[in-house]
Image (cartoon, coloured by chain):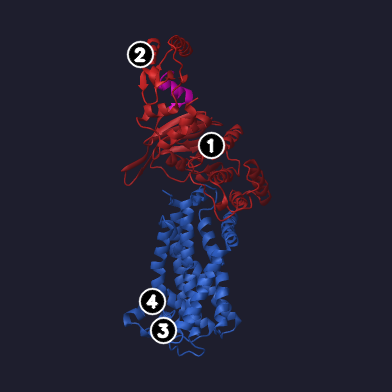
């Protein structure tokens, strides 16, 4: 067990080293969400009547945070596919290390990168008027929550990364799954404008419960549509926790088993 | 003692349509080098993957260093080194980062890892490049670092899967030197290659593999003898070709093979040097000066063609072509 932890720390360290060796990747990974903050704040901000004190940016920031951490799984999937193509996964599998070390190391490494991204986004948000009002403890909790969500989502990335042969395929697959999830949600606009049936989907969507949970933790009032009385809307924090546990419980064992059996050819 | 044993390995893909391994048997004596020689798709890599615990065969058994590969893969992983067809390294990290990472994953202590990484970088002439990212390395440097990574624990058994494929002649020469030194250190090595000359240079014995089976086994000399004895080869001016053919026929006692384009005459001979002297004297009397004359033993190319019925690889032919012409 002690050895297994050592193994996964070595793999995590590898990813942090990558961050240092090619800082461009992290810089671009940070610029993109920062750009999203600015675009949504100034393009949609005027058009959407948020009805929230402090303006649209209060609703927007939790949405962008969640979208960004959800997309962590893109880095996870693409990185893993690249490792497979290069034969690095084969080499890892020929080493006397814990079978779960490589995949756990990657999910943790990607989560650590998220810390940097979230800090930068928070600062940009603050600069354009985002003012969380719930106090330091809850704000800190909200960020922890975001990291945990990113972590649990990255297990889907592991499975995608181990299942495809080409980086570009991994990339497309991630966009096809995560993009609809983040837009069929309350992240950027209240669900009240959607057709009824989409409202139901949108409010049970884990991205929505996460966004709602973060708004609650940041001290912003949530706006719900048809499903205002539903359990996920009433208890977004609890529902999000359930989703995270489910994601890890379902995807982690499948991914580890896949890793053990995977072969490059 | 046998360091590597494989018995009746079978591995099929696509519901049995493709038989990558078709009852492969193999053994390697401790401290020796076996060259597994075969064309692309013959099952070389699949064999290595099974022995290195990466792939479970459908049938058969295998042991490495006396340990059953299928029952105790973790014990096997603790004593093998594997260097694959492509340099399996983290390209964004430096050579040093890569070596220390693998050292730690083999559970060496931090200080032992550093000492070993320093030693290996020195040995493979990579000390200067140690702090540069791998992506700035040449093909030859990548392969050497890849090999270094597989030697971190001083493995008892080493698998090298086509270690020089894709390298330029210089890179290939450097790699050969490195492998040669390694072998002197007493490691048991299974080397796959599609270059016939490579097997000839590096391996103590050679197993020729085709369609997932070993079809011949022996030292390079034994395999060559299996194909036939020496041949006399002469190249002359076009104007003397007809006359020279007659003379060669006189000595060899059989109809020689003539390549008109290359103006080359070749015929099998029994007592090589004697025949050579005889032909030279006859040519001299006829006032014909050969442009090139020599006795040629069959190359592994010839062995390969006669065993499998097809040429190994076009690339391999070009590559060995240089050396034959001496």
- Cβ atoms under marks 2 and 1 closer than 8 Å: no
- Residues rendered magenta in the picture: B217-230
The residue pinned by badge 4 equals A184
Cα distance in 3D space between marks 3 and 1: 65 Å
- Reply yes or no: does residue B146 show up in magenta: no
Where is residue B87 shown, x and y percent of the image?
Answer: 52, 47
Q: Quick check: marks 2 and 3 in contact, CB under 8 Å?
A: no
Residue at x-position 44% and y-position 79%: A187
Vertical arrangement, residue B32 with respect to residue B20, above or below: above
Distance from disc 1 to disc 4, alpha carbons, whole Å, reads 57 Å
Residues at marks 2 and 1 on the same chain = yes
Q: What is the crowding at mark 1: few (fewer than 14 residues within 10 Å), some, or many (at least 20)?
A: some
Give whichever of discs 2 and 1 has the lower sequence position.
1
The residue singled out by tag 3 in the image is A190
Q: Are marks 4 and 3 in contact (CB under 8 Å)?
A: no
Q: Secondary structure at mark 4?
A: loop
Mark 2, residue position: B254
The correct choice, above or below, for A53 with respect to A244 in the image is below
- Is there CB contact under 8 Å for labels 1 and 4? no
* Residue B316 x, y percent position in the rendering: 44, 35
| Image x and y of residue B63, in percent | 48, 37
The residue to which callout 1 is attached is: B65
Supply the letter of whichever chain is blue.
Answer: A
Q: Which chain is red?
A: B
Q: CA distance from mark 2 to mark 1?
A: 51 Å
SS at badge 1: loop
Chain letter for the residue marked with disc 4 in the picture: A
């Amino acid at each position: 067990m002690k050895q297994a932890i050592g193994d996964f720390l070595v793999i995590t360290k590898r990813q942090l080293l990558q961050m240092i060796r090619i800082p461009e990747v992290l810089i671009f990974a940070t610029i993109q969400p920062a750009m999203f903050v600015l675009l949504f704040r100034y393009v949609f901000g005027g058009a959407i009547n948020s009805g929230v004190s402090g303006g649209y940016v209060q609703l927007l920031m939790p949405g962008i945070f969640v979208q960004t951490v959800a997309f962590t799984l893109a880095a996870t999937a693409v990185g893993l596919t690249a490792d497979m193509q290069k034969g690095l996964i084969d080499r890892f599998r020929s080493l006397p290390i814990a079978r779960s070390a490589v995949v756990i190391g990657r999910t943790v490494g990607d989560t650590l990168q998220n810390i940097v991204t979230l800090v930068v986004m928070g600062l940009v948000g603050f600069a354009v008027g985002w003012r969380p009002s719930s106090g330091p403890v809850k704000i800190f909790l909200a960020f922890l929550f975001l990291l945990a969500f990113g972590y649990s989502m990255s297990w889907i990335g592991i499975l995608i990364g181990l299942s495809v042969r080409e980086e570009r395929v991994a990339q497309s697959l991630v966009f096809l799954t995560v993009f609809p999830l983040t837009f069929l949600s309350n992240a950027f606009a209240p669900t009240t404008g959607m057709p009824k049936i989409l409202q139901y989907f949108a409010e049970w969507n884990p991205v929505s419960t996460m966004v709602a949970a973060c708004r609650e933790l940041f001290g912003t009032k949530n706006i719900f549509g048809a499903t205002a009385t539903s359990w996920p809307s009433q208890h977004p924090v609890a529902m999000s926790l359930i989703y995270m546990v489910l994601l890890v419980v379902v995807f982690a064992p499948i991914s580890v088993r896949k890793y053990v059996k995977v072969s490059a050819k | 003692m046998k360091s590597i044993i494989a018995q009746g390995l079978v591995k099929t893909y696509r519901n049995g349509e493709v038989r990558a391994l078709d009852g492969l048997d193999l053994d390697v004596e401790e401290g020796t080098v076996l060259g597994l020689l075969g064309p692309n798709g013959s099952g070389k890599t699949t064999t290595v993957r099974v022995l290195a615990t990466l792939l479970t065969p459908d049938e058969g058994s295998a042991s490495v260093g006396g340990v059953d590969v299928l029952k105790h893969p973790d014990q096997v992983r603790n004593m093998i080194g594997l260097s694959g067809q492509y340099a399996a390294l983290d390209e964004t990290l430096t050579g040093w980062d890569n070596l220390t990472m693998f050292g730690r994953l083999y559970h060496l202590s931090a200080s032992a890892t550093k000492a070993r990484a320093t030693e290996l970088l020195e040995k493979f002439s990579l000390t200067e490049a140690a702090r540069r990212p791998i992506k700035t390395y040449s093909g030859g440097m990548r392969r050497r670092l890849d090999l270094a990574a597989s030697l971190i624990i001083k493995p008892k058994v080493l698998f090298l899967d086509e270690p020089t494929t894709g390298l330029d002649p210089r890179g290939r020469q450097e790699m050969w030197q490195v492998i040669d030194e390694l072998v002197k250190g007493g490691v048991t090595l299974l080397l796959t290659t599609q270059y016939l000359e490579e097997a000839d240079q590096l391996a103590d014995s050679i197993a020729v593999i085709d369609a997932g089976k070993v079809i011949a086994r022996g030292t390079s000399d034994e395999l060559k003898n299996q194909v036939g004895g020496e041949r006399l080869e002469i190249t002359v001016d076009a104007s003397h070709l007809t006359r020279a053919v007659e003379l060669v026929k006189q000595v060899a006692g059989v109809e020689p093979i003539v390549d008109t384009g290359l103006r080359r005459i070749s015929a099998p001979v029994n007592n090589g040097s004697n025949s050579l002297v005889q032909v030279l004297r006859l040519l001299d009397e006829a006032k014909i000066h050969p442009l090139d004359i020599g006795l040629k033993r069959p190359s592994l190319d010839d062995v390969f063609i006669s065993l499998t019925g097809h040429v190994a690889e076009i690339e391999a032919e070009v590559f060995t072509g240089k050396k034959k012409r001496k």
